[in-house]
Amino acid sequence: MTSPGDPGPVGRSHRRIEDPPLVTGSGPFTADLVPPDALHAWFVRSPFARGDLLAIDVGTAAAMPGVVDVITATDLDLRDLPARIGGRDHPGMARPMLARDRVTHVGQAVAVVLAERPAQAEDAAGLVFADIDLGEPVLTVAEATGTERLVHPAAGTNVVLHETLAVGPEPVGGLVEVTVAVEHPRLAPSPIEPLAALATPTDDALHLHVGTQAPHRLRDELALVLGLEPDQIRISVPNVGGAFGMKRFHPEYAVIAAAALRLRRPVAWVQPRRDLFVAGSHGRSQRHEVTLCATAEGHIREARFVLTTDTGAYPHVGAQIGQFSRLVATGLYDIPRVEFELIAAVTNLPPTAPYRGAGRPEAALAIERAIDALARRLGIDPAELRRRNLIARLPHVTPTGAKHDSGDYAAALEQALRIAAYEEVRQEQMRRRQAGEDPVGIGLGAFIERAGGAPDSWEYGAVTIDTEGQVVVRTGATSAGQGHATVWRRLIATMFGVEAKAVDLRTGDTAEVPDSVGSFASRSAQIGASAVVRCAEEVRMVAARVAADLLEADPGDLVFVGGAVQVAGVPDAGVTLAQIAAEAQGRQIALYAEERYSPGAQTFPYGVHVAIVEVELETGRVRPLRLVAVDDVGTVLDSMIVTGQVRGSVTQGLGAALYERMRYDELGQPLSTTFMDYLIPSSALDAPLALGHLTHPAPSNPLGAKGAGEGGCIGMPPAIINATLDALEPYGVTELQIPLTADRVWHALNEAAVRGAAP
């Protein structure tokens, strides 16, 4: 048997098992499951960011053809979702499912139209009139903390979290200080499949088909706001077209569930793409001020951080993301003293929530920008400054409490520099400067990633051999396209000597899987897969003992191969898994194991990314010429899937660095509502990407796996902006913020020229 710590054939590249139905169009997504008799929901949303909701006129809409019902908050007995952060409730900030007495952001749902066809619901929604007495919105953390205007008057404050940390010895005097301000704007997660849900009333109560990353958590939250017991709600997750952290609880799910129960008919909601921008959960929205204090030789002695984060109108999961940033604030560097102040506040903008990386991209951007600024201040090459400050020995506990588990940070840096041909790029840079050509720059983005969720986080797994001899696996890890079916099935198939397609994988259904935490924070493989592997080991040992009795052999002499158990070297002497299952049943021996497995620790994937960019001086366009991503994700369970995750994440990182930003005017009106004004990377961005890797297995789980899906959007943005500033240094451009749109860079160049800084 292949031991769990050595994935053997699983670690190689395999054709994904789940892909054929997806590429042929036969794999159902939520919208494909809507029955002919379903009603279709269309939400009426506030056009204003702040105001008192005086009345809602639904009469004209209710009389429209095909309309069955128009529902407002007074029609449904729905509880608010508590604002529970770190185990503590914030009174007055609970989130209503439909606005009642006031609106708190553009896009907040105030009513829902239910009609026989989607077009009828959409047309009628345009005839619902909400009478709103406008108020002046709070749009930034600075306003939230410096004004008497309250987003939630009953709360008495706009501040959700205000925490400080000071750890480590006081530094000696005579240090060089450098301070940078780094902004990470709001981003709109943009999966191929937007939000969608189908609510069907049942004899028990409710069946909800929905693409979600955490079905049991969603079930429990829905039970809370609907006033039901959790076992009255069944959540089923069909194929999911991408999630990136955003597919968790949304008020619309509760509203259509309540509507289905009210009307005793299935109700479907498929989010229009515009609503994803206007009312969907957004990511990032942080501002760091970072001060580094170092010796003249470049040894960093202290780092001071002030982080302000905008949670949007309702401070649920999004309020904790600043704490994630704090944990990894010092990156890969051995910095003995850290001071950190965190302020999270509500505003009259849509709520923020986890988005791929959740706090780690923001932290990496901040520390890596500060490292480059310090390097320029000291006249030390940025790569050399990093060499002098990297953590040398692991495991290592940082002043912020991050317990870096395994790796070799110096080796990752050197490999990335080698692949990028760092010195050759420097030579080309000098040649272009002397020739007066468009400049090139090279930038680094080193990062540490906290993966797995909370240190005590767990996941459900179960394995059994049924009476037909089939291996049945249940897992709480629900896939949103990451390749779970391929990895889980091959892991278990290897252990039982069967074909991967013969493993029955059951997931994403609260009727099939009794419990789960969910798929987020790069936790699925390290915790979810480890859970089922541990269960499979237990079942395999029991099956081997039963087979040994049947074969009159020693269990240690047996091998699992071809759906049977044989005596090693004697292929004619064997029994099938079905025969073993029948024998075990007759002897009342359970070929079954389940576990809620917790590794008791987080893992810390890391990497060093490099970007080589060219800046067109005439237009300000930043063009990536070559990219390098060196990552250590622990044990690689399937190389093709890991490569795909890294490439996809790097692409999202490029989007954040170059294009993406939710923009608002002074009234809180969104200016980014379509892909015409919210740009994302496409095939037109043709930047060659070279991958490198190191493998230091995580010591905390039996597979040695770390997270593999988020590194690109953490490491690549700082590499891009550092490369751009490196290219523009001779032109006097010393500060930029992402996204590096052509107009931003062009204006920076022209402002530098006005100051006389450009050559």
Image (cartoon, helix red, strand yellow):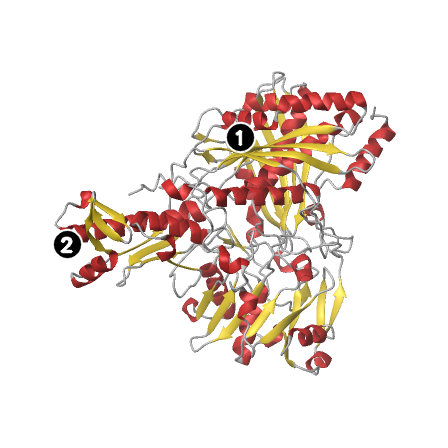
Residue 578 or residue 180, whichever sits in front: 578
Instruction: Please give the residue where the numbered disc 2 appears in the rendered image.
Output: 550
C-alpha separation, residue under disc 2 versus residue under disc 1: 55 Å
Binning the other alpha carbons within 10 Å of mark 2 as few (below 14), some (14 to 19) or many (20 upward) gives some
Residue 744 placement (x, y as % from top left): 78, 40
Residue 643 or residue 401, whichever sits in front: 643
Q: Amino acid at mark 2?
A: Leu
Tell me which label, 2 or 1, sits earlier in the chain: 1
Instruction: Please give the residue where the numbered disc 1 appears in the rendered image.
Output: 332
Residue 247 placement (x, y as % from top left): 55, 57
Residue 381 or residue 240, whichever sits in front: 240
Residue 717 or residue 152, whichever sits in front: 717
Binning the other alpha carbons within 10 Å of mark 1 as few (below 14), some (14 to 19) or many (20 upward) gives many
Residue 643 visible? The answer is yes
Please tell me whether mark 2 or mark 1 is closer to you in this view: 2
Residue 393 placement (x, y as % from top left): 45, 25
Residue 77 visible? The answer is no
Q: Amino acid at mark 1?
A: Leu
- Secondary structure beneath dot 2 equals helix
In the rendered image of this protein, does residue 490 appear above or below residue 441? below
- Secondary structure beneath dot 1 equals loop
Quadrant containing the N terminus in the rendered view: top left
Q: Are marks 2 and 1 in contact (CB under 8 Å)?
A: no
Task: Name, please, the residue furthest toward the front.
Answer: 572
Residue 756 is left or right of residue 699, and the answer is right
In the rendered image of this protein, does residue 350 appear above or below residue 606? below
Question: How many numbered badges does the structure rendering display?
Answer: 2
Quadrant containing the C terminus in the rendered view: top right
In the rendered image of this protein, does residue 449 appear above or below residue 16? above
Residue 173 is left or right of residue 634, and the answer is right
Picture residue at 53% right of the left edge, 61% below the top: 211
